[in-house]
Every structure is written in C-alpha cells, then in structure tokens.
Amino acid sequence: MELFLTIVNWIWTNIFSSAALFMGVLIMIGQLACKKGFLDSFCSGLKGYIGYLVFNVATGAFSSTFRPILNGLRSLFNVTLTVNDSYYGLSAQKQAFADAGGNDGLQGMILVVAIVIMVLMVVFRKVTKMRSFPIQGHLLTNTSLGILLVIYLIMPDASNWELIIVCGVIMALRLMIPTNFSVEPAQDLTDGSGIVVGHAQMFADRIAWEIGKKIEKDTIKKTGKKPKHLDDLQLPGWLRIFDDVYVSCFLIMFVFFGIIMVILGPDAMHEIDSSFKEGSSFFMYIVGTAAKFPLNLVILFAGLRMFVAEITDAFTGLTQGVLKGILPGIDIAAFFGYCGNPNIITLSFLSGTLIMLCMTMLGVVLNAPVIVMMGFTQMMFDNAGAGMFGHCRGGLKGLLYGTAVTGIVDPVFGGVVAWVYGLSATVQGVAAPFDQSLMLSSVGLGIKYLGMIGVVIWCVVMLALPQIQYACCKDKEAYWLAATDWEEYKRRMLNHDADVKD
C-alpha cells in the first residue's frame, strides 16, 4: 500500500499537478495510440505542452490585469463582498480549509477514485449513456481540490476514506454529466470536429444552444430567414474599426474599464495597483491597461492554435481506438476559434459582465445575505461560452439570452455555495463557475439537511439526467451518432434549415 501511495504521489506531484504537462503527456499517448512513431508522438506532445504554457500565460495575465480593478470595485461599494472567481476563490477556499485543519494530501486519491469511476462510466456507456470524457488537466486537478476543500467544511467529522469516496463520486458526476450535455452544441459549432467542452460551464453552453435553436426555429417560421448574426451587421464608415477583433477589444475595454477607473479615481488606483507609479499620467495608465486585453488575446490565440492542432489530431485517433465513440472534453477557450467572428467573444464577455455587475448592485440594494462580486475568470469564460453557443444558431438574440443565463446564475448560485459552506462569513471567496455553482449548492444543501442520504439522492438525480436526455431523443440511434457520425446526425436532426434564406 505504501509503494502504491508513493507511485500515486509521484505521478500527482510531477504530472497531474501541471496542467500543461498533463495535456502534453495525453497528446503523446494519443499519438502513440494512432500508431505514430515515438519521435513524432514526442514532438506532438511537446508542441501541445508549449502551446498550453503559452495559453496559461495569457489566462494568468487576464486575471492579473483585472484583479486591481476588481479590488477597487470591492472597496467602492464599501460592503462585504464575496468574490466568485475560479482562482481567487480557490485560494480563499484553501485558506478556509487550512484554518479548519484539513489535509489536502487527500486530493491525489480523490482524483484517482474519480478517474476510475469516470472510466467505468465510459466502459458501460450503453447503460450510463456517456459519450464524452473530460481530459482537461487543470479542470481535473482544480475540481478534485475544490470539491475536497468545500465538502470537508460541511463534513468535518468524516474519516479520510469517507472524504475520498464521497468527493471522488461527486467529482466524477460533476465532470461526466455536464460534459455529455455539451456533445451536440460542440459538434454543431465545430461541424463535427470530434471535441466537446470539458470545462466549467457545459450546462450553460447546452442551455444557450437550446435557446438559440428555439430562436432559429421561430425566426425561420415567421420570416423564412435565419436570425441575424454578428456578421450580418455592416458597420458603416469609421465604425468598421470594430471589424478587427483586437482594435474592438481595446476600444471596448478602454471605455468599459476606463469609466470604472475614472470613478475609482487615480488615488485609489495608486493604492490598489503597484504598477501605477506616482507621477504617471492617469489617462495613459488607462490606455495601457486597456491595451493589455488585446495583447493577452494575441498570446491566448497563439497558444490555442498550437494546443488545439495537436490535441485534435491525437484524440481523433485515440477515440477511434482506445475510446472509440467517446469524444474528449477540452477547455472552452479552444472553441473560440470556431465561432467565426472573434468579436462574438468580446460582445459575450461585455454583455454577461454588465448583467453580473447589475446582479451585484441588486444584491447591495436589497441587502442580500451574501453579495457576490464576479471575478474575471467567470466573466470571460462562462459568458463567452454561453454567448458563443447561443449565437451559433440564435444569432445576436441567442447571444444575449445565453449571457443572461450565466449573468444571473453565476452570482446567485455562487452566493448559495458561499452561504452553504460558510465561505461568505470567513474568507469572502468562492470558486463556483456555472456548473459548479449549481452542483455544489445542491449537494451541499443535501448534506447540510439530510447527511449521506442527501449525497445518495444527489447522485441518483445526476445519473438520471443522461437517461432523461436519451429518453427525450426521438431518434435513439441519433443520440450516439452525434458523437460518432456528425454528418448523419445533421441529416436526421438538423436539416430543417436546408432551404432557408440567410
């Protein structure tokens, strides 16, 4: 047993704890499974690893650019705000966990238990109805840690093995069920590229896509045309500068965050952002801050191009071999390049962010027991994902409806998570993106009031969701074709717009 734990700990410390290295190893394994030579497989894995590192640089830079502004807003409201952000919140949860005397060494065993359950769900997919498998390295590691941190707070008297089993089961279902719901939306957006979303907002992506389909169907029925998409907006004259994603990103961020920073004032920004030096021009500071966003986009897309090219190639072969018929679930940002017009991402971010800020202000006005301020991670990736999938078929209206879903659910249910686990009263931070906010709030309430019976009920409900999804599919064969033969699925299920005017 000691040898086994030593091996698991080495793998965890050297591979699983590094999302980039983990993805590089998976890509290499995928290429080897495709019967490619070791050297080619190694190079492919290395390129994926480097691409993911570049991607991480961009996402980290996004957060560091936004954080001073977030802190300023928090001070401006002069109220106790609970920040809902995947990285800031995880750090806060670690503090609460440590203060309660928790042992984070259990994380590796939780991850092993969860992966075993996930593999079994795939092996017995005819029973479980699973069609996908999340392979996103940092999602696996962050989820195992995040679930341990909060479940321990509500089950402090549980033994280590009880925590390992309960957290492992919750983690497996939290990842597998939502990923399965993203199959049709992801395949539709990418036109059958063989990848699905395995991130933090798969339920939101599915809801937004379904809303978009309804909008498309109603619009076609009324007008005989598809809904207006962003590409249909012809910007006249000087407004055409918004056709360039980087220029439009700068201008939007300059106006949006410029207003916030002007309200906060230069004195406050000097205090909360050490990069704003005394004697520097406040206007040029705003310009420089706004310019960081398109700069980070350039870095992000460069990393994604490297990473996605390698993982798509590797797992196309792997899913045809080792996991035949199973689609890999990857980072939501990997789908940004498929949405056609990159400004869809910018508009989705802005739309959802405005709604989230309105929800925060509403909480202040109503003196809510928990007032949530959303962090950049959810503002960017939850909103961008929902807006992108809503726009896929529903056009601009679908984009706005999709971001309305994330804009409301994230702060509301994130607040429920913070309240259930006592985080709002202690560390004022929670890591609860869309899917996590729904699932951790529900399982937390179950444990809080029903104990282990609540966990069992939650598991039964989660396992029932894909069964309901399958039962609601009129063409049972098409349910599986969505993952194995997208062209045939389109012919059977999505052919209603074949003769529609654009």
Image (cartoon, helix red, strand yellow):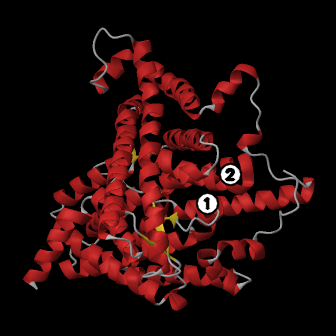
Q: Amino acid at mark 1?
A: Thr
Q: Relative to 232, is 150 above or below? A: below
Sequence-earlier tag: 2 or 1: 1
Q: Secondary structure at mark 1?
A: helix
Mark 2–mark 1 distance (CA, rounded to whole Å): 13 Å
Residue 120, how many percent across, how many down? 40, 87
**Residues at marks 2 and 1 touching, judged by CB atoms closer than 8 Å:** no
- Report the front residue among 342 and 267: 342
Q: Tell me if mark 1 has few (under 14), some (14-19) or many (20+) residues whose alpha carbon lies within 10 angstroms of its own.
A: some
Q: Relative to 306, is 467 above or below? A: below
Marker count (numbered)? 2
Query: What residue is rendered at 35% in x and 45% in y?
Result: 54
- Residue 40 can be seen, yes or no: yes
Q: Quadrant of residue 57?
A: top left
Residue 260 - label = none
- Report the front residue among 80 and 6: 6
Look at mark 1 in the image and give the residue it sits on.
Answer: 190
Query: What residue is rendered at 37% in x and 83% in y?
Result: 117
Q: Quadrant of residue 28?
A: bottom left
- Residue 141 can be seen, yes or no: no
Look at mark 2 in the image and give the residue it sits on.
Answer: 391
| Left or right: 168 as drawn, with respect to 347 | left
| Left or right: 367 as drawn, with respect to 247 | left
- Residue that lies at the very extreme toward the left in this rendered image: 2
